[in-house]
Image (cartoon, rainbow, N blue to C red):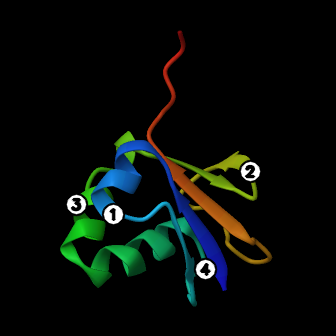
């Protein structure tokens, strides 16, 4: 079981701030594929991965990063400075 946390417009499109996901995904990309297949709202939120960033257990990661041993996946748009 992995906690998946959504931020900013990703949370707005999916309609949830976080959820627990039972997954057999090996990588972040595999998890995104599984989630996208659930419903249109997930597919819309994850349609353009170039507009998203991911953190695994609060460490920035890539979409090809393995999920083995990971407790939390956070998905969010890039942060802008200010």
Q: Residues within 10 Å of mark 2 (few under 14, many from 20)?
A: few
Could you say where residue 65 lies in the image, as x and y percent from the top left? 64, 62
Q: Residue at x 22, y 60 (%)?
A: 44
Q: Distance from label 2 to label 1 (Cα)?
A: 21 Å
* Residue for badge 3: 44
User: Do we see residue 50 in this rendering?
Assistant: yes
* Residue for badge 1: 14
Q: Quadrant of residue 11?
A: bottom left
Q: Quadrant of residue 81?
A: top right
Q: Distance from label 4 to label 1 (Cα)?
A: 22 Å
Could you say where residue 66 lies in the image, as x and y percent from the top left? 67, 69
Q: Residue at x 53, y 9 (%)?
A: 82
* Residue for badge 2: 58
Instruction: Please report whichever mark, 4 or 3, sits nearer to the chain's N-terminal start.
Output: 4
* Residue for badge 4: 26
Instruction: Please report whichever mark, 3 or 2, sits nearer to the chain's N-terminal start.
Output: 3
């Amino acid at each position: 079981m992995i906690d998946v946390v959504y931020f900013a417009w990703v949370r707005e499109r999916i309609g949830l701030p976080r959820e627990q996901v039972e997954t057999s995904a090996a990588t972040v990309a595999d998890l995104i594929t599984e989630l996208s297949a659930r419903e249109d709202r997930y597919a819309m939120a994850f349609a353009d991965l170039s507009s998203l960033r991911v953190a695994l257990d609060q460490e920035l990661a890539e979409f090809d990063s393995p999920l083995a041993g990971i407790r939390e996946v956070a998905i969010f748009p890039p942060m802008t400075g200010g």
